[in-house]
Image (cartoon, rainbow, N blue to C red):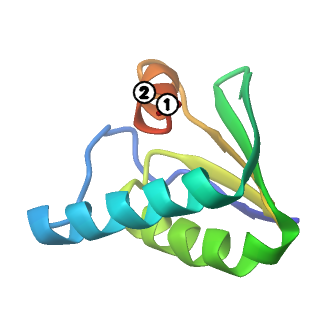
Amino acid sequence: MDTFRATSDTIACALTPDDLKETQAAWDKLLRLSLVSREEVPGGLRLIVHPGSADALRRLIDVERECCRWITFELDGPMVKMTASDGGEAAIREMWSPP
């Protein structure tokens, strides 16, 4: 398991509007086609995708680690646990809410 700890307390996205649209589209596609489970956990959310989509999940987490430095990511193959303190928990759940 790879753990990437939050490096900021500021809840903000550093993506440009175009990059944000592209990233959101990639997440929508991954979750629409490969989501196995979505579970609320203390501090945030756990997502599990089909094992064949683990590489796509890792690529998206790499993007998120750069733009959302307020989130701690625990990545283990097709599973990611995303947590944050204070208002970050609600933001995570909203950002990755079911369609």
Q: Is residue 79 left or right of residue 66?
A: right
Tag 1 and tag 2, C-beta contact below 8 Å? yes
> Where is residue 90 shown, x and y percent of the image?
46, 20
Q: Is residue 39 left or right of residue 33?
A: right
Quadrant hosting residue 12: top left
Q: Hey, what amino acid is under mark 1? A: Ser
Q: Image point 52% across, 46% down: which residue?
A: 71
Q: Image point 24% across, 62% down: which residue?
A: 20
Residue 94, labelled with which disc?
2
Quadrant hosting residue 9: top left
- The answer to which of 87 and 40 lies nearer the viewer is 40
> Mark 1, mark 2: which one is toward the viewer?
1
Q: Can you name the residue that lies furthest to the front here?
A: 33
> Where is residue 49 shown, x and y percent of the image?
76, 57
Q: Can you name the residue that lies furthest to the left here?
A: 17
Q: Image point 43% across, 67% down: which residue?
A: 26
Q: Is residue 39 above or below residue 3?
A: above
Q: Hey, what amino acid is under mark 2? A: Glu
Q: Image point 28% across, 70% down: which residue?
A: 22
> Where is residue 34 shown, x and y percent of the image?
70, 59
Helix, strand or loop at label 2? It is helix
Is disc 1 surrounded by few (<14), some (14 to 19) or many (20+) residues within 10 Å?
few
Q: Is residue 37 above or below residue 55?
A: above
Helix, strand or loop at label 1? It is loop
Residue 18, labelled with which disc?
none
Residue on which disc 1 sits: 97
Picture mark count: 2
Is disc 2 surrounded by few (<14), some (14 to 19) or many (20+) residues within 10 Å?
few
